[in-house]
Every structure is written in structure tokens, then in C-alpha cells.
Image (cartoon, rainbow, N blue to C red):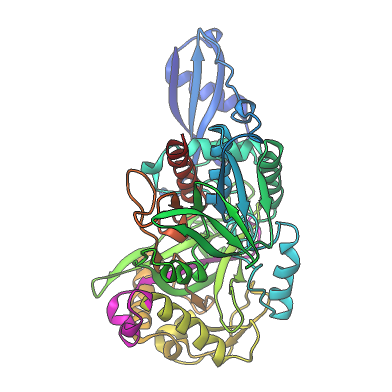
Amino acid sequence: MIKEVEVRIDLSKVNDEEFLYQQGIKKMFIDHGRIQHWEVTKKSIDARQRQPVFVYRLRFYIDEAPVEKQTILSQYEDTKNKQEAIIVGAGPAGYFAALEMIELGIRPIIFEQGKDVRARRKDLKAIQQDGVVNDKSNYCYGEGGAGTYSDGKLYTRSHKRGKIIKVLELLVEHGAKTDILQDAHPHIGSNKLPQIVQNIRKTIEDFGGEIHFDATMTDLLLEGKKCVGVVINNEKEYRARAVVLATGHSAREVYTLLDKKGVTIASKPFALGVRIEHPQTIIDEVQYNRKDRGEHLPAASYSLACQVDDRGVFSFCMCPGGLVVPAATAPGEIVVNGMSLSRRDSPYANAGTVVAVEEADMSEFADEGKFAGLAFQKSVEQKLFAYGDGSQRAPAQRLTDFVAGKLSADLAPSSYIPTLYPAPLHELLPKGIYTRLQQGVVKFGKMMNGYYTSQANVIGVESRTSSPMKIPRNKDTFMHDDAEGLFPCGEGAGYAGGIVSAAMDGQNVAKATARYLK
């Protein structure tokens, strides 16, 4: 018999396994001699009361031992002589599609326009310290995708896509700590993910797959209504019966290429705003009701949302104990994002704070048709860059000055390495976006006492929450109706929003690919 119970533990007992075990036994009224095995299946924090507590879900095996579970990787077989499928993009959607294909007996051939995960570091250093943006290798492009060097949060609400646990188990089998199987909001960290991503690459190659870096898809091969392959770097054709497009939310040239080839694309809703950075101590005190969170509590986070003039204003990609980083993908633009290392021990907390973009905001780009959202997104990024000095220094205001609509005389300390400079974001941002952000953060201050403070900086611009474009696909076949054999996938196609949801979409697309090929 297997039984699960929930146990609430005071902070002082959080590392006492024997105490945890005994509390679970008391809940069940069962003689401990009948317990063959026990384990933690979920761990979270309840900070709603004056004193935060840890909440554990424990699983007990009574009068029986757990069945030893076979690892996912132990079930893989070599695909070297199997049918091939092309994957464009080596982010979570592309890599997890490849792993699923191997499990299904398909040989994945992956093309990534950026560099491998280690080589990317030089380009990240260049954008951080020298303001030099490599349009093929940056925080968004390269092995592992945007998630590798921007935090590694593994939380998703997209349970309808499939079983999240398989993604987490594969990450553990490739080197992640088993904690991610238990934590309510699992996180790996940008310092740990590169090695895990390399391990995934090795698995793909060990089982017959191929991975090509510095390999940009410059054309899509179509024969009638069928997609039959890709052209890489304007030079070489690669053919396969199935092509998975897992190019991420910032690969704008892919949309242009598809439109040129007559493959239907469409605009989709997206959001745009700023990144707001507080001292972590403020967030800790608000959320935990204590000035010093102590050794057991992690850096506190928050999630805020409200309506302003019938439009959503919400926090996004919250990074406790994190850093703000430059996330531009081309020269001449300012884009910021957030990340946390595994320990989340930075003295700062940051979160994207964004507004849903609607047609009224994009009226001056109406002539762009379905590309209006993309043109609007670009225009804001380029406007903020043009206001600056030609570097990746980011424009910012103190939060209270942002709301008051006045230029800050100086700025609060920040984690942003290229540095910040005072700028009138209230004038630089589109009016409809600014006014809703202005009213939204005032509401947030009422929801979360201490949030609204001059010690926080508002940094522009947070514009890559998702793609403003979508590559439609058939809900049954996962293929594009205009191109048989073409499988749009992940964030860039409009079907995911983060590492886990992108990985799950990759798995689902791989299954659809297998059905099509077989």
C-alpha cells in the first residue's frame, strides 16, 4: 500500500529528516515497522502566516517496497541507421524534441545558428562588458536557447501539454539535482545549466544524432505543398521528410523567410514593458514578515497582476536573488532580461513588468499588416538604444520617479553590468504602455506593502516576453497546413512560454513527427 500525507515543518526543523519522518508517521497512525520506504514528493513554502513554514508531501510504502524505476536513457537505442528528421534550433524545444525522437527510433539532425554553450560565453562577456552584440550568439541564440543563460526556471502552468515530470526526470538524468522533482517552483540556475545542456548534446550524439553549430537556416526547401528540407548558410541543402522549426521567440528572420515562401504566418498577442529591480531584502521582508530571512528560507519571490483600463499589467519571469542582463539580439537595440544563479544569492530581485499590447498601440505600423507587432517591438527597442550613447547601458528611473513622470537625479544600485543611466522612460515608452505601467505599479504597491519604493529601479525595455508572431499548425497533425512535413514548435511558433513548456511542446511535436514518418 502507498499512502501520501502532508506535513508542515517549522524552519528550525527543516533539515531534520528523522523529525520529518516521525511527523509523517503520526499523520498515518501506522507502526513504523511496516514502512518499507519513504520519500519527499513535493516541497513548498507557506508564508501566509506570520511565521513561514515548509510544507512537505511525503509518500510512504507500507508493507511493500517501491518498484525500481527504469531510467529514460536506459531505454534509448542507436538511431544512426534510422530515418532522419531535421530540427532547426537547439533550445529546449529542439533538444527535447531530439531526445524524444531518439526514444521513438528517429535520427535527429539539428542545426543551430548560434554557438555551442561554452563558446557562447565569450559573446555574453562581449555584450556585458563591451556592448558588442553578436547577432548569431547572445543571451537568446545558441545551444540551450534563451533559458540556459537567463535563469533556468522550470515552473509552468501548461499542464495540458503533457507530463511535466518527464522533462524534469530527463534534466536530472543529465545532471540536475533531484530537488527539482520535489520543489513547487523548481530552478536550476544559469551557472548549472551549461553542463546539463552539454550532457544532453552528448546523449543526442551518442545515440546517432547530429548537431551543427554556426548553421543558419537560410532557405526552406518546398516541393509543391511539401517541405523536403532546408538550406544552411546559403550553401548546402539538407533533405528530410520532416522539418521541425524550433527557432525561439526572437528569430525574426524566420518569419520573413516563411512569408516569402508563401507559408502562412500570423500576428499574435504579446506584452511589452520594463524590468523592475528591488533590493532583495525588501522583497524578503514583505513576503516573510522578517528583516532577515535566515539560512533556511530562499530568496523570496512575488507574482503580481492587475487590470488597468481593461488591459492586463503583470509581473513576468521573476528572478529572486538575480541579475538584470542585456538580451539584445542585434546591434542598435536595447533589451533587458533577468536571470538567477543556482544559489540565488545576489542582493537584488528583479521581474519583468509588462502590459498586453493591442492594435491601438501599433496604429502607426498598420501598413505592416501581420508584421505590425514585430515592427512595434523593434521600434521601441531601437528608440531606447538611440536615446543612449551607442552602448548597452540601459535607460532607467527610480520607481517613484517613473510614476511621477520625472527624470531621476540618480539611480539606486543595480546588478546590471553594462550600467544604467537616468532617462525619461515615461517619454520614451509608448504612451499607452507607460500610463498602464504607471497605474499598475501603484496598484502593486497597495497589494504588496513596500513594493512601491524609491530604492527600486525601472529599467527599459522588457520586450521579449514572447513572440508577436505565430506559425500556425494543425491541432491534430502538428504540421503546417501549407507545407506537409513542416512542424512549427516551441516559443517561436507561439506554442510555449518557457523552458518546460517549450520542452514539452518539443516532445509532443516529436511524437507527431514519428506518426507522420511511420
For the question of whether residue 402 can be seen, the reply is yes
Name the residue at the left extreme: 310
Residue 402 screen position, x and y as percent: 45, 84
Looking at the image, residue 91 sits to the left or right of residue 45; the answer is: right
Q: Quick check: is 363 in the magenta stretch? A: yes
Give the vertical position of 189 relative to 444 (above or below).
above
Q: What quarter of the picture does the N terminus occupy? A: top left
For the question of whether residue 279 can be seen, the reply is no
Residue 362 screen position, x and y as percent: 33, 81
Residue 255 screen position, x and y as percent: 45, 68
Residue at 43% across, 71% down:
260
Residue 147 screen position, x and y as percent: 58, 57
Query: How many circles with numbers are drawn on the protein?
Result: 0
Considering depth in this image, is 328 or 260 the residue closer to the camera? 260
Name the residue at the front extreme: 224
Please identify the quarter of the rendering in which residue 14 is found. Answer: top right
**Magenta stretch, residue numbers:** 344-371
Q: Quick check: is 418 in the magenta stretch? A: no
Residue at 54% across, 65% down:
219
Give the vertical position of 28 relative to 516 (above or below).
above
Please identify the quarter of the rendering in which residue 17 is found. Answer: top right
Considering depth in this image, is 11 or 384 the residue closer to the camera? 384
